[in-house]
Image (cartoon, rainbow, N blue to C red):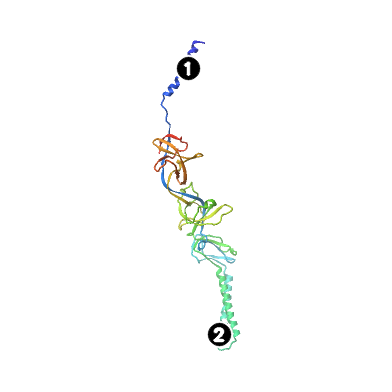
Amino acid sequence: MKPASWLTMITAFIVMQSTPLQAADEPEVVTEVAVETGKITRATLHRYVMAYGLVEPEPAINGKPAASSKIAAPIAGILTQAFCEEGQAVKKGSTLFELDTRAADALVAKVDVAVEFAQKNFARKQQLNATDNVSRKLYDEAELLLQAARKDLANAQTQRELLRIKAPLSGTVAAIHFKVGETVGLNMALADLIDLDRLDIALKIPSQEAISLRLGQPVEFKLGTTTGSRPDAQPTQPGKVIFISPQIDPLTDTVLVRVSLNSGSGMRPGQFVSARIAVEERSGRLAVPVESVVSRETGSTIALVKGNTAKQIAVTPGLRDGKLAEIAGDGIEEGMTVVTQGAYGLPAETHIRVIK
């Protein structure tokens, strides 16, 4: 072998032997993970049943009449007058519509003549009876004739009054379904009347969750859908559970639950709402921001911060209420600092750099 080749091999061997020695002399690189932190606090947490439903007029309940009515025609006829319009507030007993009264007016006039004749006939019989110039039979017949005529007049006037359709409750005319001049059939709805001060919310609750419900439980609701466990895209309104159906709908496996709605809420029948019902309250519980709890198949952990080091410890999670999650475990106390953003994927123990 040539001397140059030996020289090359010796040089390469020296380089290979010297490289680990140089790396051992370099300082160890400490990895820092940028994270955000929060505090362990004590809080009152709630468990909620989430549900969706519609705003509806109150049904007849607890001895109160229903808050809505379909104004129907008691007899068939032609609509000749409308004394209301859509959106108008009306009082109970006020006349809303009138059907054609010509035939009824003619009948009342005819029966009224008969009553007048019967009254005059009975008056003559009374005069004759005072002087014993009339038989008892003729007197009784005249009296019965007058009574029958008066009864016929009352019936005719009642039929005439049925043509004037009145409001069964105070409320707002929500819709009118016929125009003047149109023929209305028996029991056909002329209009919808709703008392907007007496509305509630009808919720459909899964039967398994309905087990936790009780009358009087507080409810928060808002228009539209909820985001997460706490609705905050829209302002919420308060209510309470006022009715829980004793039956389960076999088609949907849900229970009808009604929630009170304060007068002046501004809501309207048919609006879609999301709601949450507080079914449990736990006070004085240790809680952390929800993002600080990391759950895996092996269990849940949080990363406690001491100085510039974060160390994972096992915890038992509990209720989640909005942005807080209940925790329990050894060695955790109120006021301790935990990693929030960046907790997922942290090693069991690592150096950190707090950015917030």
The earlier-in-sequence mark between 1 and 2 is 1
Report the residue at 58% width, 77% height from top. 149
In the image, residue 278 lies at what x, y percent?
47, 51
Q: What is the quadrant of the C terminus in the image?
A: top left
**Residue 108 coordinates in the image, percent (x, y):** 57, 74
Q: Is residue 67 left or right of residue 284?
A: right
Question: Relative to the observer, which residue lies in front, 31 or 90?
Answer: 31
Q: Nearer the viewer, mark 1 or mark 2?
A: 1
Residue 40 percent across, percent down from the top left: 41, 43
Identity of the amino acid at label 2? Gln
How packed is label 2: few (under 14 Cα within 10 Å), some, or many (20 or more)? Answer: some
Note whether residue 260 is visible.
no
Above or below, 287 relative to 127: above
In the picture of the structure, the residue carrying the numbered disc 1 is: 13
Residue beneath disc 2: 126
Camera-side residue: 38 or 182?
Answer: 38
Q: Secondary structure at mark 2?
A: helix
Tell me if residue 32 comes above or below residue 192 in the rendering.
above
Residue nearest the observer in this picture, 221 or 117? 221
Looking at the rendered structure, the kind of residue marked 1 is Phe
Q: Is residue 208 visible?
A: yes
Q: Residue furthest front?
A: 330
- 336 lies above or below 67: above
Identity of the residue furthest to the top in this view:
2
Kind of element beneath mark 1: helix
* Label 1 crowd (10 A; few <14 / some 14-19 / many >=20): few
